[in-house]
Image: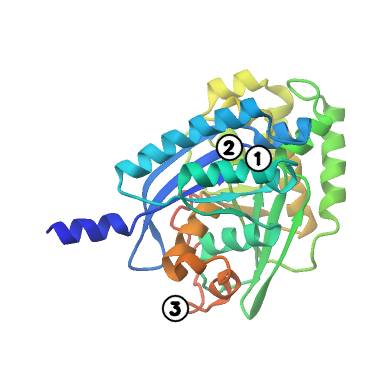
């Protein structure tokens, strides 16, 4: 049975994402269908986006901290006989003046390729993680509100997806307008105005369904869900979350719910962007999925190998087994509940 154990181990794929808010490590094994079997998932809140916003680069002391975080992930991958680790970087390392130095250090440490993703690639990876290359039954908005930017795709049953990004995210919008904890009403109104202005120029479309991925949507739902296992962020639930944010300090939020302080701090900006997208496309709700670009990368590597990035548009646009029967199909990590 030794060969079988080796085969199982070799099918595991490890991905690290360097995002605006966190440094995330995901290991999963592709299943026989379109989904993934999770092996491990860990993250460290790092706020790389705020660091780059403040300094224009990643200072040496922060690069040393990143080295310590990555060393733990490398040890974990080695313990699972996984090499190399694929690293993807997003908004902060598209802007950092010393991005080349940071990326070279990361590549040396992890022993694998480092990909600085374009906005369109992030949108494609979120879409791939949720739908697995299958066509949606109805035109569907897939949205990832990140810390520094918000990528989205409008997937269509009979054509390629429309892709774009809003160059602001939950952390950046919060930092721009929120000065108090909890935020004052006029601060929230300013954040809403900015979000609506940013989203006003998004691509044309008439989606009848929406899926939100990533930590912002997950934590907004956690804020109002309590013990309920809801999977939809309805307009009413979003308004309830906004009301709670205006009345509750970050410390109180973290005591009452499983939301970490750094994530709770940026929820006002995330809520403003979520509301703006729902308003822009006339939607009443969005399914909240725990899928992410990391799952998208793992699926892409499993299907296309080392050339996954060049083949990404083809993979996402492929018909797979045929059309979805529901907007959740293919999203193995969609939160359960009503």
Q: Nearer the viewer, mark 2 or mark 3?
A: 2
**Mark 3 closeness class: few <14, some 14–19, many ≥20 residues within 10 Å:** few
Which numbered disc covers residue 22? Answer: 2
Is 216 rendered above or below residue 132?
above
Q: Residue furthest left?
A: 1
Percent coordinates x, y for residue 244 in the rendering:
68, 29
| Residue under label 1 | 20
Element on which disc 3 rests: loop
Mark 2 and mark 3: span between their CA atoms? 34 Å
Is 195 rendered above or below residue 258?
below
Q: How many marks?
A: 3
Horizontal side of 205 relative to 115 (left or right) equals right
> Is residue 164 visible in the rendered structure shown here?
yes
Q: Nearer the viewer, mark 3 or mark 1?
A: 1
Is 286 rendered above or below residue 188?
below
Q: Quadrant of residue 242?
A: top right
Query: In front here: 161 or 109?
Result: 109
Is 253 rendered above or below residue 153?
above
């Amino acid at each position: 049975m030794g060969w079988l154990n080796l085969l199982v181990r070799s099918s595991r794929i490890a991905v690290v994402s360097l995002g605006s808010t966190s440094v995330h490590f995901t290991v999963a094994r592709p299943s026989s269908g379109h989904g993934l079997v999770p092996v491990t998932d860990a993250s460290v809140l790092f706020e790389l986006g705020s660091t780059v916003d403040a300094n224009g680069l990643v200072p040496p002391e922060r690069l040393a901290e990143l080295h310590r975080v990555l060393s733990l992930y490398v040890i974990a991958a080695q313990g699972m006989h996984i090499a190399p680790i694929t690293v993807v970087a997003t908004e902060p390392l598209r802007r950092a003046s010393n991005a080349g130095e940071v990326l070279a250090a990361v590549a040396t440490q992890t022993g694998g390729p480092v990909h600085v993703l374009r906005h369109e690639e992030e949108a494609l990876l979120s879409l791939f993680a949720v739908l697995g290359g299958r066509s949606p039954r109805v035109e569907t908005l897939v949205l990832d509100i990140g810390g520094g930017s918000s990528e989205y795709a409008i997937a269509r049953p009979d054509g390629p997806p429309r892709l774009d990004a809003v160059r602001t995210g939950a952390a950046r919008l919060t930092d721009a307008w929120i000065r108090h904890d909890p935020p004052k009403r006029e601060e929230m109104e300013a954040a809403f105005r900015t979000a609506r202005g940013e989203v006003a120029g998004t691509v044309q479309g008439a989606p009848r369904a929406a899926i939100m991925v990533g930590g912002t949507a997950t934590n907004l739902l956690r804020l109002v869900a309590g013990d309920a296992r809801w999977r939809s962020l309805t307009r009413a639930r979003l308004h309830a979350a906004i009301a709670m944010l205006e009345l509750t300090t970050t410390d109180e939020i973290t005591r009452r719910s499983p939301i970490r302080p750094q994530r709770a701090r940026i929820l006002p900006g995330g809520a403003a962007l979520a509301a703006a997208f729902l308003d822009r496309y006339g939607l009443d709700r969005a399914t909240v999925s725990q899928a992410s670009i990391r799952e998208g990368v793992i699926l892409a590597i499993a299907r296309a190998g080392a050339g996954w990035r060049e083949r990404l548009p083809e993979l996402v646009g492929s018909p797979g087994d045929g059309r979805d029967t529901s907007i959740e199909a293919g999203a193995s990590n969609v939160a359960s509940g009503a």
